[in-house]
């Protein structure tokens, strides 16, 4: 078992179940051309997000961390015709690249891209008394993941699914003495998930075309 077979099997799965069209491959290309990091989810992870969205009949989606819009395109494509997605991105340049890619994918009418730090924008969304979101994808900077998750809960209803990317970090979460702020951020989140009685959560390890990592999946519990 090694990275090579994980990659080959990832490609085997995506060839069947998550083929990329030109809008998606152009988005990945734009990251290199515009100097953005290759931190997008993989095709199979994009498809996984769609499966989760359809399982909870998601019409209203919130994403933290847009980058070039690759995950945004997967998410927006799984919305019904009247569905809406708000995606938050702190970096102006990333936002501009993402908007172009979302427009090229024909999805700009469904996507509301908010430029700013998630910790500034989330309280604004709460003040605007938005209807609760059905599905929330947390994939911005890692140190404040616990704060992001708490905001996500405030914007949720029973049944809302919250997915958090990159919570295993090549297994570095096992190191209780890690000095890496990203690792510390996801360790805090994972501990909080284990203690929070209002949600039911698990973590799936992810292997394949991306670094070895994991996604946390939480569903907000029914009340009583
Ligand atoms: N979801 C994307 C990848 C996101 S990478 C995909 O799978 O295609 C993480 C993104 O979060 C980067 O674009 C980064 O600029 C952004 N980010 C970093 N700090 C942030 C913050 N405080 N608020 C919002 N976005 C932030
Ligand atoms: C990083 C962030 C991501 O969202 C990702 O999927 C992979 C790596 C990072 O900041 O290191
Ligand atoms: Mg990520």
Image (tube, rainbow, N blue to C red):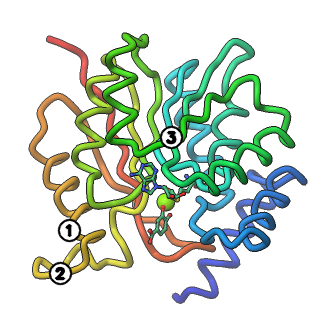
Question: Which residue in the protein does label 2 denote?
Answer: 178
Q: Position of residue 124 (x, y in %)?
A: 37, 24
Q: Position of residue 105 (x, y in %)?
A: 84, 40
Q: Position of residue 188 (x, y in %)?
A: 16, 58
User: Looking at the image, is 12 positioned above or below residue 119?
Assistant: below
Task: Say which residue appears at 63% left-offset and 83% top-offset.
Answer: 5
User: Looking at the image, is 126 positioned above or below residue 169?
Assistant: above
Per the image, label 3 sits on a secondary structure element best described as strand
Task: Say which residue appears at 85% left-offset and 50% top-offset.
Answer: 23
Q: Which part of the image, by quadrant, shows the C terminus? A: top left
Question: Which residue in the protein does label 1 denote?
Answer: 184
User: Looking at the image, is 102 positioned above or below residue 152?
Assistant: below
Quarter occupied by residue 131: top left
Circle 2 packing at 10 Å, graded few (<14), some (14-19), many (20+), is: few
Q: Are marks 2 and 1 in contact (CB under 8 Å)?
A: yes
Circle nearer the N terminus (3, 2): 3
Asked if disc 3 is less than 8 Å from ligand 1, the answer is yes
Residue depth check, mark 3 versus mark 2: number of the one nearer the observer: 3
Circle 3 packing at 10 Å, graded few (<14), some (14-19), many (20+), is: many
Task: Say which residue appears at 39% left-offset and 49% top-offset.
Answer: 164
Say left or right for 14 vs 58: right
Task: Say which residue appears at 13% left-offset and 38% top-offset.
Answer: 196
Q: CA distance from mark 2 to mark 1?
A: 7 Å
Q: CA distance from mark 1 to mark 3?
A: 23 Å
Q: Position of residue 3 (x, y in %)?
A: 56, 86
Per the image, label 2 sits on a secondary structure element best described as loop
Q: Nearer the viewer, residue 183 or 93?
A: 93
Q: Nearer the viewer, residue 175 or 203?
A: 175
Question: Which residue in the protein does label 3 denote?
Answer: 88
């Amino acid at each position: 078992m090694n990275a090579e077979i994980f990659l080959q099997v990832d490609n085997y799965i995506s060839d069947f179940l998550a083929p990329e069209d030109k809008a998606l491959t152009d988005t990945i290309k734009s990251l290199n051309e515009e100097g953005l990091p290759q931190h997008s989810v993989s095709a199979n992870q994009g498809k996984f997000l769609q499966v989760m969205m359809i399982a909870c009949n998601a019409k209203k989606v919130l994403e933290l961390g847009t980058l070039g819009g690759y995950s945004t395109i997967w998410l927006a494509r799984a919305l019904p015709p009247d569905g809406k997605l708000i995606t938050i991105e702190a970096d102006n340049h990333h936002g501009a690249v993402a908007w172009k890619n979302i427009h090229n994918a024909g999805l700009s009418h469904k996507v509301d891209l908010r430029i700013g730090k998630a910790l500034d924008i989330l309280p604004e969304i709460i003040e605007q008394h938005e209807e609760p979101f059905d599905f929330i994808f947390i994939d911005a900077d890692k140190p404040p993941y616990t704060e992001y998750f708490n905001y996500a809960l405030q914007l949720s209803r029973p049944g809302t699914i919250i997915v958090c990317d990159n919570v295993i970090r090549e297994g570095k979460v096992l190191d209780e003495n890690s000095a890496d702020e990203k690792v510390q951020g996801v360790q805090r989140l994972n501990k909080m998930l284990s203690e929070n009685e209002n949600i039911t959560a698990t973590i799936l390890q992810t292997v394949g075309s991306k670094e070895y990592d994991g996604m946390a999946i939480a569903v907000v519990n029914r009340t009583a």
